[in-house]
Amino acid sequence: MNYVEGSATITDGRAFINPKAKLSRDATIAYARLQPGIKNALDATSATGIRGIRYCKELGLEEATMLEINASSYESLKSNIRSNSVKNAKCENTSVQEFCNREPLRKFDMIDIDPFGSPAPYLFDILKVAHENSVVAFTATDTAVLCGAHMSACIKTYDSVPMHNELGHEAGIRIMLGFFARLAAQFNYGIDVGLSFSYMHYMRAIVKLVKGSKAALSSVKKLGFAYKCHKCGWLGTEQGPFTTISRCPSCGSEIETSGRMWLGGLIGEDVRPALAKSMGEVAGSDKRECKFIESLALEPDIPFYYSVPKLTKLMHLPSISELVLAKRLSESGHVAAITHFEKSCIKTDASIEEIRAAITSISKTVA
């Protein structure tokens, strides 16, 4: 085996490596490059070691600690660290939980958790080795759970009701972030979401911790619920510990409720202007990845989106271009753009009545 990615070459493939997760690794490096003071990192689920090796070589870390619980994968990890001549990396054949409870006095500037399935079982423990301003990055591949295909599993794992519809991927990320915000608050941390996205088979979130009870409470206050009306297409959100909306304010129909979840931003305003440029400077990044990150940086930070095909179907009208609708709404003074979650959907601050009126108007010109 000889897999090259960024500045790392993986020659020992006894551990699992996923080339499709390259964007996740590249995007994390792009974000971390914009954060001053990252000198050490914990790669908590190392496998081949590709994340930790790349972080050492591309972020100029003084030290990295890499964990791998599987014995065979641990041998692969050691071999790859040697073959990449990484002198500032330490590795341990242990679990995340055992390490974090054994070494609570060790603190890391950046912590990365990329497990198979849900990150939920690991997040409480990694907060024990975090500090103020730590960057915490985590991946979820249990997307069927987070997107509502297995509602009971989502309630059990994340203490949240998911959405099993076209909003599922954004709801899933927000559920994952809400879960982490509640855990972080127990350690007196608030969260500042730097970058989060859904891509292929996984969801990725990168957050910075903010110390203090005020920050923790501020983050918890950004938790709430999302609502969807399947009759007219209305969408809404409500911050707070309880739901107070049971019927659609637009048409009076019953609504679907999801949550609690994070209703704050999904991309940090401080990194938004520089993110695409930083991605382009990451070793081995390609045009497709850069275009994806550029689209993320331009995406309106508005909770949820409208499916144009579903709205036209609800209205018994012919299909229209989502780009045309976004342009029409923008010309009317609204924020409107395609979302990375679903290319046939738009994020906008227009009301459902304004959106339906625009669709009706456009349909008359294409009929």
Image (spheres, rainbow, N blue to C red):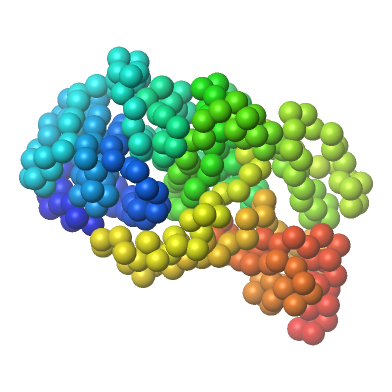
- As displayed, is residue 311 above or below residue 163? below
Quadrant in which residue 226 is drawn: top right
Residue at 30% in and 33% down: 42
Say whether residue 238 is left or right of residue 218. Answer: right
Residue at 51% in and 30% down: 211
Quadrant in which residue 246 is drawn: top right
- As displayed, is residue 229 above or below residue 246? below
What count of labels does the image hold?
Answer: 0
Residue at 78% in and 63% down: 350
Residue 162: x and y in percent read 63, 37
Q: Quadrant of the C terminus?
A: bottom right
| Between 113 and 59, the one nearer to me in the picture | 59
Say whether residue 213 is left or right of residue 240. Answer: left
Residue that protrudes farthest toward the top in the picture: 102
Say whether residue 83 is left or right of residue 159. Answer: left
- Residue 292 in view of the camera: no
Quadrant in which residue 49 is drawn: top left
| Between 300 and 342, the one nearer to me in the picture | 300
Residue at 69% in and 33% down: 221
Residue 75: x and y in percent read 12, 31
Residue that protrudes farthest toward the right in the picture: 252
- Residue 244 in view of the camera: yes
- As displayed, is residue 131 above or below residue 365? above
Residue 141: x and y in percent read 43, 40
Residue 363: x and y in percent read 79, 78
